[in-house]
Image (tube, grey):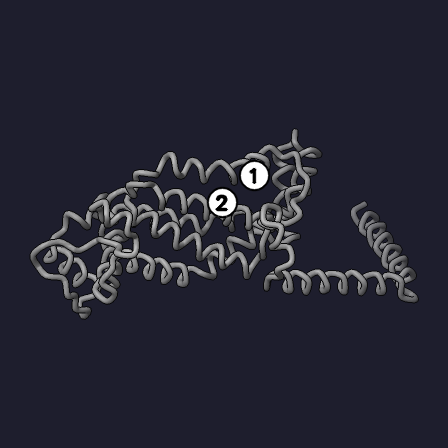
Amino acid sequence: MTDIWNDVLVYPLLTLLVIAFDLIHDFGLAVVVITVLIRLALYPLYVRQIRSSRSMQELAPALNDIKKKYGNDKQRLNEEQMKLYKERGVNPVGGCLPMVVFLPVLIAMYAAFQQAPHLDGATLQEIVHRYLPFVPVGIPSEGHIDMTAHWLPWIEAAGRDLSQPDPFYILPVVSAALQLVASVMAMPRNPPQTDDPTQRTMQSMTYTFPLLTIILFRDFPAGVFIYYITTTIFQIVQQYFVMGWGQLPRWLPFLRTIPTPADRAMRQREAAAVREAEADMEAAEAPGAQRRDGEGRRNGNGQRRRRRRARR
């Protein structure tokens, strides 16, 4: 299983890192470049995740009402929930799909930083040529790859590279802070009121999980945190365009006066919903609408009576 894992994900990722390093000559910047390329390739998937997560948050009050009404009837509860998802065009698992990609890449990045210091230049060249045989790599066959990030002076001054933990835990703290910002931005500006314990747990995890990141993962290789920080910054920028500031103005009030591209899109959707509602009301109040509706009901009742007589 380890060989399959390496061949499918770890070595291809390491190949991209080595090629980027061969062009940039800085392993930290190579991680940043490869991370940005991965996020760009998966951009549509992450946009779908953001919108699905926001839709699920907006559906929380309606789902809570359904649970109160049909909590004792599991089958009916599931039917009503699926009906609500279908009516609103929401995929309940849509927000989980990017995690299927994100977690394996994160684990593979960790494995790459664990293995790279122990691979000599000849082995790295062999790995690269296995996946990209026509790409030349300028790594000497003897020695090992330089995994230093020259733009992180406190790590270099401590005599460490990106395969080792940050000696002052600066990168773990920065990654946790950015994760908190991204999580708060993902929350709706006007959160729906709900007493659903699941929703309350998710909201509390927004503030506690970044702290757990520092406590549990502080001794991870520094290069893994560069990947995590880069992907989180990309996520923040993406959310700015797709959803706006979220609840971030609650903690940074000056952001309330700064519009986002998502605000204009939201106003357009609201205006379209208003126009649709007005059109429906005008159609209902149009002359003859009630008469046609009454005739439709009479015709329907007549058809049902005829079907009952035919069955007799």
Residue 192 in the image: x percent, y percent?
A: 67, 43
Left or right side of 181 for 5: left
Three-letter code for the amino acid on which mark 2 is drawn? Leu
Q: Nearer the viewer, residue 89 or 161?
A: 161
Left or right of 250, for residue 132: left
Residue drawn 34% across the image and 47% down it: 225
Label at residue 203:
1
**Residue in the foreground of this view, choosing between 94 and 39:** 39
The answer to which of 275 and 85 lies nearer the viewer is 275
For the point 59% across and 51% down, the residue is 246
- In the picture, which quadrant includes the C terminus? top right
Question: Which residue is at the far left?
Answer: 142
Which of the two discs, 1 and 2, sits closer to the camera? 2
- Quick check: 169 left or right of 115? right
For the residues marked 1 and 2, what is the alpha-carbon distance in whole angstroms? 12 Å
Which percent across, then down, holds residue 71?
65, 31
According to the picture, the residue beneath numbered tag 2 turns out to be: 180
Q: Secondary structure at mark 1?
A: helix
**Disc 1 + disc 2, Cβ < 8 Å:** no
- The amino acid beneath tag 1 is Gln
Q: What is the x, y in percent for residue 275?
A: 76, 65
Question: Badge 2, how many Cα within 10 Å: few under 14, some, many 20+?
Answer: many
Residue for point 65% across, 53% down: 88
Query: Which image quarter is the N terminus in?
Result: top left
Mark before the other along the chain sequence, 1 or 2: 2
Foreground residue, 78 or 120?
120
- Using the rendered image of the protein, determine whether residue 212 is visible from the camera's viewpoint: yes
